[in-house]
Image (spheres, helix red, strand yellow):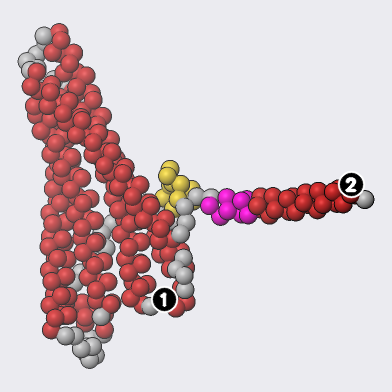
Amino acid sequence: MILNAIFWSWHTASRRLFCILLVGAVLALSQVAHADPLKTLPPVAECVKRALQAQSNPENLEASQAVEIEYQVRLAYERILVRKEQIGISREVQGHFEKAVTNAEKKFEEGEGDVTQGALTKLKLGLAGTLNDITQFQSDIALARLDLEGLMDTRIDPGFEMADDSLSPREFPFSTLDAYREKAEGSGKTWREVSPERRISLEKSMVRVNQARSQFNLARKNRKMTRALLVTEVANYDFGIGDEKDLFETLIIYTRVLVGFYDALYNFDSAVAEFEKEYLKR
C-alpha cells in the first residue's frame, strides 16, 4: 500500500514536471519566434505604422503623440540612410589613401622622387582619420537602429538591408510662416488663432529651415566641383604629375565637402520636420 502511494505520488509529480517543461518549451519557442529580428528594414512609412501600433493604446493615441513618434522614426531612418552614404564616401577615400601610402612608402625607401617623411606622415594620418570616420558612422547607424527597435518594439538584425535606400531632400518650398499657413489651411480661409509667443516660436523655426536650406544648396553646388577636383588630382598622381601634398589636400577637401553635403541634407530635413511637428502640435 505504501509502495503504491509512493508510485502514484512520483507519477503525478512527473506528469506535473512534464507539463511545466512542455509549457516552458512552448513559451520559449514562442518568444524566439517573436524575437526573430528583421533582416530587411521596411520603408519609412511602414516603420512609422509599426511604431504607432507598438504603443500601449494605439487607438487612443493623442495627435501630438502620433506626430512626435512619426518625427522620431523618420529622423532615425534618415540618419541611417545618410550614414550609409557617408560610409561609402569614406571607403572611397580610404582606398585612395591606402594606395598613396603604399606608393609613397616605396618611393621614400628607395629614395625615388622627393617624398618627405612629413608628406608620408600626413597621408598616414589622413588614412587614420578616414578609418575613424567610418567607425563613427557605423556606430551612428547602430544607435539609430536601436532607436527604431525601441520605437517599433521589434528587433532589427545588425546586418539589416534597406527596403528603400533612396535619399533626397524633402519638398518644402516655403520660406515664410504665412506662405506655409496659406498652403496648409487654404487660401482665403480664416486661420486659427496663434498666440504671439507661439507665432514667434514658429517664426524662429522657419528661420532655421531657411538657414539649413541655404547651407544645403551651397553644399550641393560644392559637391560637383569637388568631385571633378578629386578625379583630376587622382589621375595626376597616378601618372606621376601630382605629388603627395596635392593628393592629401584634395582627399581632405573631398571628404569634408561630400560628407558635409549629406550632413547638410540631414540638417535641412530635420529642420523641416521640426517645423512641421511644432506647427501640427499647436
Q: SS of the residue at dot 2?
A: helix
Q: Is residue 97 left or right of residue 62?
A: left
In the rendered image, the residue lying farthest to the front is 2
Q: Residues within 10 Å of mark 2 (few under 14, many from 20)?
A: few
Question: Looking at the rendered structure, which numbered label has been put on residue 61?
Answer: 1
Using the rendered image of the protein, determine whether residue 256 is visible from the camera's viewpoint. yes
Sequence order check, earlier mark of 1 and 2: 2
Report x, y in % for residue 63. Answer: 36, 77
Over which residues does the magenta segment extend? 27-35
Residue 200 picture quarter: bottom left
Residue at point 23% right, 25% down?
A: 98
Q: How many marks?
A: 2
Residue at point 19% right, 34% down?
A: 129
Looking at this view, is 149 or 100 the one in front?
149
Residue at point 19% right, 54% down?
A: 264
Dot 1 amino acid type: Leu
Q: Is residue 141 left or right of residue 7?
A: left
Q: SS of the residue at dot 1?
A: loop
Residue labelled with disc 2: 3
Q: Is residue 172 above or below residue 144?
A: below
Report x, y in % for residue 84. Answer: 32, 45
Distance between mark 1 and mark 2 Cα atoms? 63 Å
Q: Residues within 10 Å of mark 1 (few under 14, many from 20)?
A: few
Q: Is residue 143 above or below residue 205?
A: above
Residue 168 picture quarter: bottom left
In the rendered image, the residue lying farthest to the top is 110
